[in-house]
Amino acid sequence: MTVAEQEPFLRIHGVQKQFASRVILEQIDVEVQRGEFIAIVGRSGCGKSTLLRMIAGLEQPSGGQIELTQQAADRTIPIPASTSTRKSTGKRGKMSKTARPPHTSRPNTRFLFQEARLLPWKTVLDNVRLGIPDKSVEHASEALRLVGLADRELEWPSILSGGQRQRVALARALASHPDLLLLDEPLGALDALTRIEMQKLIERLWIEQGLTVVLVTHDVSEAVALADRVLLIEEGHVALDIQITLDRPRERDSGFAHFENLILHRLLQPTAHPHPLEGQRPPNFSI
Ligand SMILES: Nc1ncnc2c1ncn2[C@@H]1O[C@H](COP(=O)(O)OP(=O)(O)OP(=O)(O)O)[C@@H](O)[C@H]1O
């Protein structure tokens, strides 16, 4: 079955959201394929987190529908065409199949926030075990190994750095083998270098674990570094939906700058004057 024939994994159709009489999102229509990495950008207060919370089911839309494919992911499915330019490590779907929970009626969805939200009275390992239905020590250890913290299992969250705490939160999310990972500015509080390291980690895990990811970020450069598609929300609508057709891992070259400028131009001048390069191919364009 080709990607074009596949049912979207996530369908957001005519979604509207208002708080009291204030309309935040007027009409959002987006389809996401299984395995895609989507980034959502937009001005502060445009409704990015609200949309993510609605996808997670933490908030109800005032109108429209959000549908997730009923059957949980089969990890053996091929990578969608939109991600085929990524340089895969060949280790996709690495966590053991026997470790996966049985198929459930709703895809397993995990949410990561800007703060790691760890329990300070539990060890790193026990925090990760909280994310697993059967609290398996083995699976928690495996998840910690994936994020590079195998040697910190018995430590307390308070002695970890901010980046390490986010790694633990990521391990806790991954330990239950999610189909869909929702990231709400998870790197927003980190310094620039740690942020880039975490971006690389998230990209690697996305490839290896066959995840579908929706990331909300203020950082256009982060969106271009990570996403297959960047959605820009403006005045309650998706004003831009751009396919980032750059090879992975992404170099911060002229092609990268092309996409960054395209998105920044629109963010800074929201009244829809198209960027002079909009629709043109970036210098190192590839399919
Ligand atoms: N529970 C709520 N009750 C009332 N208003 C809310 C509620 N949640 C969000 N809002 C409002 O909805 C708007 C969008 O909020 P949201 O957090 O989704 O924006 P955002 O784009 O994620 O912003 P930022 O980038 O600053 O995090 C804001 O004006 C916010 O005050």
Image (cartoon, rainbow, N blue to C red):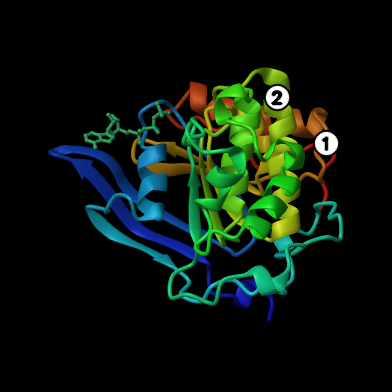
Mark sitting earlier along the chain (2/1): 2
Residue 209 in sight here? yes
Which mark is on residue 283?
1
Residue 280 in sight here? no
Question: On the rendered image, what quadrant is the N terminus found in?
Answer: bottom right
Q: Quadrant of residue 90?
A: bottom right
The image shows residue 147 at horizontal and vertical percentages of 72, 43
Which mark is on residue 194?
2
Question: On the rendered image, what quadrant is the C terminus found in?
Answer: bottom right
The image shows residue 279 at horizontal and vertical percentages of 65, 42
At 59% from the left and 34% from the top, the residue drawn is 166
Quadrant holding ligand 1? Answer: top left
In this rendered view, identify the residue nearer to me: 151 or 235: 151
Q: Dot 2: what SS?
A: helix
Quote the CA–CA distance across marks 2 and 1.
Answer: 29 Å
Give the vertical position of 270 relative to 101 (above or below). above
The image shows residue 210 at horizontal and vertical percentages of 69, 61
At 46% from the left and 36% from the top, the residue drawn is 119
Q: What amino acid does circle 2 point to?
A: Thr
* Front label number (2 vs 1): 2
